[in-house]
Amino acid sequence: MRYETLNSQILECCPDLTADEAAETGKNLVALLKILHEAVQEDPELKKFLTAQMKGDFINEHKQ
């Protein structure tokens, strides 16, 4: 995804942001994605959990 596309999607969701705020938000989202990518490389169970959350298959290990 290109930054221009990401910024336009951010502005679509949050129209009150300035262009600079949208750009900063995009940079922070990309940084977060990099952190998550590294984390799931180290812990395959985390990848399974995040994938289930994105699909709406909420995993609750405390269910009885």
Image (cartoon, rainbow, N blue to C red):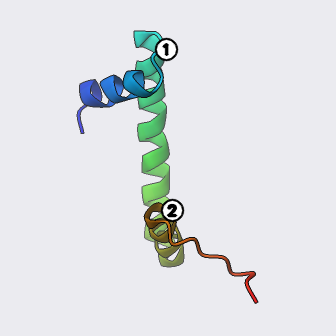
Alpha carbons under labels 1 and 2: distance apart: 30 Å
Q: List the residue tagged with mark 2.
A: 39
Q: Position of residue 53 (x, y in %)?
A: 52, 65
Residue type, mark 2 in image: Ala
The image quadrant that residue 60 belongs to is bottom right
Which residue position is annotated with label 1? 17
For residue 47, above or below residue 12: below
Dot 1 alpha-carbon crowd within 10 angstroms: few under 14, some 14 to 19, many 20 or more = some
SS for callout 2: helix
Name the side, left or right, on which 48 lies relative to 12.
right
Q: Position of residue 13 (x, y in %)?
A: 44, 28
Name the residue at 34% across, 29% down.
9
State the SS at label 1: loop
The residue shown at (45%, 59%) is 38
Decide which of 12, 23 is in the foreground and name it.
12
Label 2 packing within 10 angstroms: few (<14), some (14-19), many (20+): few
Q: Position of residue 55 (x, y in %)?
A: 43, 66
Quick one: quadrant of the N terminus?
top left
Q: Height in image: 20 above or below 59?
A: above
**x, y (%) of residue 32?**
49, 44
Q: Amino acid at mark 1?
A: Leu
**64 and 37: which is toward the camera:** 64
Give the residue furthest to the bottom. Answer: 64
Q: Earlier in the sequence, mark 1 or mark 2?
A: 1
